[in-house]
Amino acid sequence: MKLLKINRLEEINARYNSNRLEKTSFFQSMEKMERTRSFQEEKFTKRKAKEWRNRGLDFFSPITTCGHSYAVVFCLFVCFFVDDNLTPPAPFDHRIVSAKRAGISSYYNVSKNEILGGGRFGQVHKCEEKATGLKLAAKIIKAKGDKQKDEVKNEINVMNQLNHVNLIQLYDAFESKNDIVLVMEYVEGGELFDRIIDENYNLTELDTILFIKQICEGIQYMHQMYILHLDLKPENILCVNRAANQIKIIDFGLARRYKPREKLRVNFGTPEFLAPEVVNYEFVSFPTDMWSVGVIAYMLLSGLSPFLGDDDNETLNNILACSWNFEDEEFQDVSDEAKDFISKLLIKEKCWRISATAALKHPWLSDHKLHCRLQNQINYYNCN
């Protein structure tokens, strides 16, 4: 079955006809290379050098890029960039929050003109704590009835249990007659989806590895806490800033605590990211989130949505058929390791999908030599 391109990407289809490995190199000048070499000399001992040689990476083996011969220290920088691409923590300690029955305006200046995002729940505005000047985000959720308020309080309860750098942190909450406001950590990089559709931002496979690795780390933590996200999609992943590939997962409004003895079914989510068991209203568990990770990885690598149909019914039928492939030209330069990673997630039977922990050990996310090779490909195409 021919895959359908995301409707929102139609205006930039031409970008995906160009080589997807075009991107600015990590090193724009010899000065940066010298700083990297100095970093290597300071941080690595002879014992480390021997360790890396045993893994097939000689510190001083020459490589050639743009006609210049560099040391494999370049590869080592790529490896540690992937391993240590540390997302900054929230600018406050983890808090246990309960909704105050008070007006938010007594404590915070909410900027009604600075809308950071929105969705089915309402809108997110930039705000500032009056006492400290701390910049935060205020998620204003329309909740008039008790049922709606209980759903929002479930989100508060979930966020109270989650303390991880790749999961957005809750700072405060306020309840009034018609809404509940969640005051959260503020990040300024925009949605991951924006990077997919930005024609001025060329996503490489190495970029995708960095994003997916952090998503898996956040989801691994959630699953260790026995919490399912159940609404993973690029719109619910925020970039910390415009420059770095650091992310935080947001929107825990549909998240649920997983209790193995209490079989959980759900009938909500975003159609093109739903796992087959959700569509069939069968029991959900940790692999349900991992299906969504597979869809996100597929999209980041190609700009295609593997199951998107002309309408929701067609999309859901495509998911149930679990019919997808790598035949489109967008995948011609994608590594076999990436394809294998996706193939271990987009499996109809959830028991066969790999876990977040196993995903982090998969060669696509963990093989340093692969990451070095991908960076060398980027440099090659930048020079030609």
Image: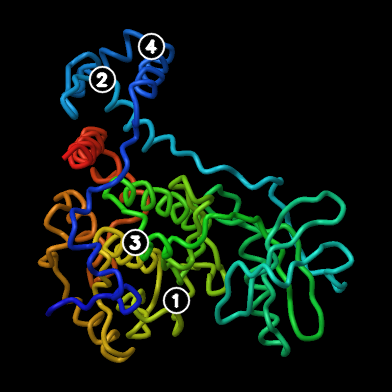
146 relative to 71, above or below: below
Q: Secondary structure at mark 4?
A: helix
Q: Which secondary structure, mark 1? A: loop
Q: Quadrant of residue 194?
A: bottom left
Mark 1 is on which residue type?
A: Lys
What distance separates the C-alpha of mark 2 from that of mark 1?
47 Å
Q: Earlier in the sequence, mark 4 or mark 2?
A: 4
Q: Which residue is mark 3?
A: 199
Residue at the spot of label 2: 52
In contact (CB < 8 Å): disc 3 and disc 2: no
Up the image or down, 330 lies above or below 2; here it is above
Q: Nearer the viewer, residue 255 or 141?
A: 141
The mark that comes first in sequence, 2 or 1, is 2
Nearer-N-terminus badge (3/2): 2
Q: In front: mark 2 or mark 1? A: 2
Binning the other alpha carbons within 10 Å of mark 4 as few (below 14), some (14 to 19) or many (20 upward) gives few
Question: Would you name the residue on which mark 1 appears?
Answer: 263
| 105 left or right, relative to 300 | right
| Residue type marked 3 | Glu
Q: Nearer the viewer, mark 3 or mark 2?
A: 3
Residue at coordinates 32% horizontally, 32% vertically from top-left? 78
What residue is drawn where x is 25% and y is 46%? 364
4 vs 3, front mark: 3
**Quadrant housing the C terminus:** top left
Residue 203: x %, y % from top left: 31, 53
Between residue 138 and residue 13, name the one nearer to us: 13
Q: Which mark is residue 41?
A: 4
Distance in Å between CA atoms under marks 1 and 3: 44 Å
